[in-house]
Amino acid sequence: MAFRFPRFWPMLLLLGACARTPRPSADQANKYHDATIRQIGTAQDERNTAALLPFLTNATPAYRREAALAFASVQAPAAVPGLIPLLRDADPSVRRAAAYALGQTGDSTAVDSLGLRARQEKDNAVRRYLYEALGRTVTRRTLPELWRVETANDTARAAALAWGLSRAALRGISSPESIRQAVLVLNTPKMPTRARLLAVSGLSRTRGYDADLARLAQETLLRLALKDRSYAVRAAAAATLGKIAALPAPAVPLEAATAPVAKPAGSPAAVLARLAVKDSDYRVRLSAIRALPFGPESYSESRKAVFYALSHDRAPVALTAAEWLLAHAKGESGPLLAALADGNKQASPRVRAALLQAAVRHASSASRPSLTETIRKRYAAAPTVYEKGFLLQALAEDPASFDFAQVEAAAAGQSPVVAGYALGALLAMRRSAEFPAARHPDFAAAMRQALASGDVAQIGAAAEAMADAKLYPETQAADVAALRQAQAKLQLPREIEAWQGLQQALDKLEKAPKPTPSPIATAQQHPIDWAVVQSVPLGQQVRLRTSKGIILLELKPNEAPGAVASFVTLVGQKFYDNLYFHRVVPNFVAQGGDPRGDGNGSAPYNLRSEFGDIHYEEGSVGLASAGKDTESCQFFINHTATPHLDGRYPIFAQVVGGMDVAHKLEIGDQILGVELVK
């Protein structure tokens, strides 16, 4: 059939042109065309505190601001005395940068100065930064500094308080009063979305105060979970309600204990079950399923929501439902769970494998052998290394599959992806209470073989096992010597993560009084290529072609010049072409860019962390790391806002097109090509 344009096609073209997202012009230079700002950027990259300090008193406000922002990445306590006077700078942008840097440094000696300035500051934007910095520097003793000023009827100050409360909670610093203050923030009219998200995210990260959450925050959380206009707020509220729903049921009189009592329609358990199947955003449904209670009084209703998701929802939600059954199934038979995997032909391989894993875990001893035999047959026919890995995770539930997994781990020419999953399966089997004592020597032999393999992933798994007295109770002097020999053969900085794993094991086995510092690569090993940075205009886009579709990224050279220069250089070398997304955590991140494909690969160099004044939102693109100043080539794309990553992982790009594709990415999806958009 021939396609015909409608008669009004010129109008459609005009509307399409008007709908295009405006982009900065190609000649819009980034800030590093300024030689002095490049000088500051170089000192930041070199972690050269002495070179940066004089810029804090420079006559030009822009240079004072850039020096303060540089210290947000350097995080040197020696800079605190120089940053504190900038809290009174005449330029608001300098005051913001100084507060941000003090928070990033995390030095509690700055609390008094930050608190005093927060009470005096008239600029709402600056005040927000001061409260955030307080949240990152207060101690349990000084936590009340956050609410010394009454915020009632002051929406701007209440919003700023949300930043402080959240940052403190992420550090494990909370109290019943901080919970009450967060509830007051959440009930303040016209509270901005970001502030609501931070306040409820802080509550979700509060530890040790679940009863106080139920007493002080339950009604507010129920309202947010059901009615807030932001998916991120609803999802965070659902996660927090899970903490309340998991609390033991209150005691009931003996005469009423035998009468079935339906949960109120507005109870946390009932609301979570409703959100799990009815919320309009898959991320909220997913968060609700993770939070569903699994006690005897709630299991039946939770089960209904889980089974519905398995058959009717998109892959990330179905996977979360399968993982809920893996962790919490009660009274489910192995064959029933296996039938769910077989009956849902539309489910992804990862979902089916998770259901098979749940089937093996919850199977009777009589039905387990037939289930594991089915999994082995599927393993033999699996078309990709990642699907083989998912099935090895399922076999990890059966210690009788030890020999099968060991053979796969040590097979000549084995894919590092499969070998890594197989080693992980061996560790999981050894942790099982069903693992026979007679096989302990075989496990020890398998770990020694892995350590001798020279493969970084296998070395890491062996080190983890040898450092765990429950898995490896009789570590010998020869084992410690083998760990040191394996560590000496690693290539630094490329294999820094494996080095860290081995050193942690050695510190534990040798009872080191404090952790051994990592040999972090210096800037001289791989300095920032400023010529590449200057070649990247603001608004520069990158086309990421994947097996699921195209994702458009916009680079952020002003916030992360070193990361952008590295990424652009690797793109020019076709480094990322034909690599894979090896890690996908639903409603969190999709991570790729590893040349090994298993999460243990790297470029030949490391980068220094660049913590620009920017926050993780949906579509933020960050660099993975094994700790500060260890970033390399692996990157991740956020599915949702993640405040707990702010200031801890560099952000070097933002998705500006194809976010729907990013949400569909699964482990094993391929990066077909990456190129700059001209």
Image (cartoon, helix red, strand yellow):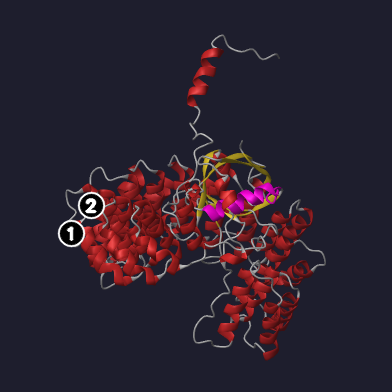
Using the image, determine if residue 509 lies above or below residue 417.
below
Farthest right residue in view: 412
Secondary structure under tag 2 reads: helix
Q: Amino acid at mark 1?
A: Val
Q: CA distance from mark 2 to mark 1?
A: 9 Å
> Percent x, y for residue 300?
46, 54
The structure residue drawn at horizontal position 34% and vertical position 52%, both measured from the top left corner, is 61
Q: Amino acid at mark 2?
A: Arg
Quarter in which the C terminus is drawn: top right
> Percent x, y for residue 521?
59, 69
Q: Is residue 562 magenta?
A: yes
Say which residue label 1 marks.
149
Quarter in which the N terminus is drawn: top right
Q: Main secondary structure of the magenta part?
A: helix
> Percent x, y for residue 175?
28, 67
The structure residue drawn at horizontal position 27% and vertical position 45%, both measured from the top left corner, is 191
Which portion, as a residue range, is magenta? 561-577
Closer to the camera in the image, 619 or 86: 86
Bin the neighbour count of mark 2 within 10 Å (Cα to Cα): few under 14, some 14-19, many 20 and up.
many
> Which dot marks residue 157?
2
The structure residue drawn at horizontal position 69% and vertical position 55%, both measured from the top left corner, is 386
Residue 262 in sight in this render: no
Secondary structure under tag 1 reads: loop
The structure residue drawn at horizontal position 67% and vertical position 82%, both measured from the top left corner, is 484
Bin the neighbour count of mark 1 within 10 Å (Cα to Cα): few under 14, some 14-19, many 20 and up.
some
For residue 51, which quarter of the picture? bottom left
Residues at badges 2 and 1 in contact (C-beta under 8 Å)? yes
Return the disc, 2 or 1, that comes first in the chain's sequence: 1
For residue 127, which quarter of the picture? bottom left
Closer to the camera in the image, 503 or 530: 530
